[in-house]
Image (spheres, rainbow, N blue to C red):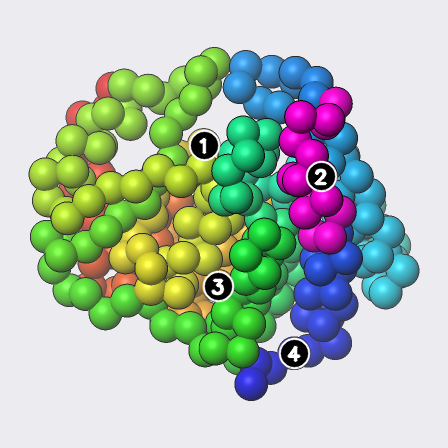
Amino acid sequence: MPYLSPALNVMTAAARKAGRGLIRDFGEIENLQVSLKGPADFVSTADERTERILIQELSKARPGYGFLVEETGVIEGPDKSHRFIIDPLDGTTNFLHGIPQFAISIALEREGQLVSAVVYNPVTDEMFMAEKSHGAYLNDKRLRVAGRKSLNESLVATGIPFHGRAGHERFLEELLPVMASTSGVRRFGSAALDLAWVAAGRFDAFWERGLEQWDVAAGILLVREAGGVASDLAGGDRALETGDILVANDKLHPQLLKLLRAAPRG
């Protein structure tokens, strides 16, 4: 059975409550009021409602904690040592196209350290969760990253810069050697789930540039508690700050890091 700290228990309960609304909205995609926030970056009423529910539930259970949330931004709390980092709907474009590959992502920081994590896909009812020093779980099953040692056996996930974002040329320069060295590359459209799937051993690795803290915070802890390595694309520990991330097991991580760092900077 997973170790559920009081904080993690609160986080899973909040994710399940918010997830029920997402399931209802997902069943009525055509009725959603959708506004265009930027190029290929959509905000739906479902996204905004989910954020409100999460903030309300977490604030009620942990009054005083701060928040870093995708839509609202920074919410300061009197308790400066704790902060929730939330993406209420990671994979918004998938959601709006009726693709059931999206998730609620919640991480808890204590004194600047990631200590609890939840990534929840309400459609599949898969609750990925981790507690620092207590492991990572999918529902009641303990997770371990895949044990493959060779790139040519590995399945790697990534994210592609969408319309309106920089980095297309650089991505293609990185993609070519990875494609040539692995058994396949996948782009599923939800970084939080990509990271959770690395923790679950479904993907062997994942890399992407230009992400936000709420995209990766929970996933980083999931991967590390499942025995994997999470770094920025310089090999350091600043993925949350830089938005550039690579995760894999300890055998594949240095191999992929070498490939990516050797790619020309388009």
Q: State the separation of the CA atoms marked 1 and 3.
A: 20 Å
How would you rate the neighbour count of disc 1 (Cα within 10 Å): few for under 14, some for 14-19, many for 20 or more? some
Counting residues from the start of the chain, the first of labels 3 and 4 encountered is 4
Q: Amino acid at mark 1?
A: Gly
Q: Residue furthest bottom?
A: 1
Residue at 74% of width from left, 23% of height from top?
A: 33
Q: Which mark is residue 222?
A: 3
Q: Which mark is residue 25?
A: 2
Counting residues from the start of the chain, the first of labels 1 and 3 encountered is 1
Helix, strand or loop at disc 4? loop
Picture coordinates of residue 177 (x, y %)? 13, 36
Magenta-colored span: 19-33
Mark 4 or 2: in front is 2
Residue 248 picture quarter: bottom left
Q: State the separation of the CA atoms marked 4 and 2.
A: 29 Å
Q: State the separation of the CA atoms marked 2 and 3.
A: 27 Å
Mark 1 or 2: in front is 2
Residue 68 picture quarter: top right
Helix, strand or loop at disc 3? helix
Counting residues from the start of the chain, the first of labels 2 and 3 encountered is 2
The residue carrying mark 1 is: 210
How would you rate the neighbour count of disc 4 (Cα within 10 Å): few for under 14, some for 14-19, many for 20 or more? some
The residue carrying mark 4 is: 4
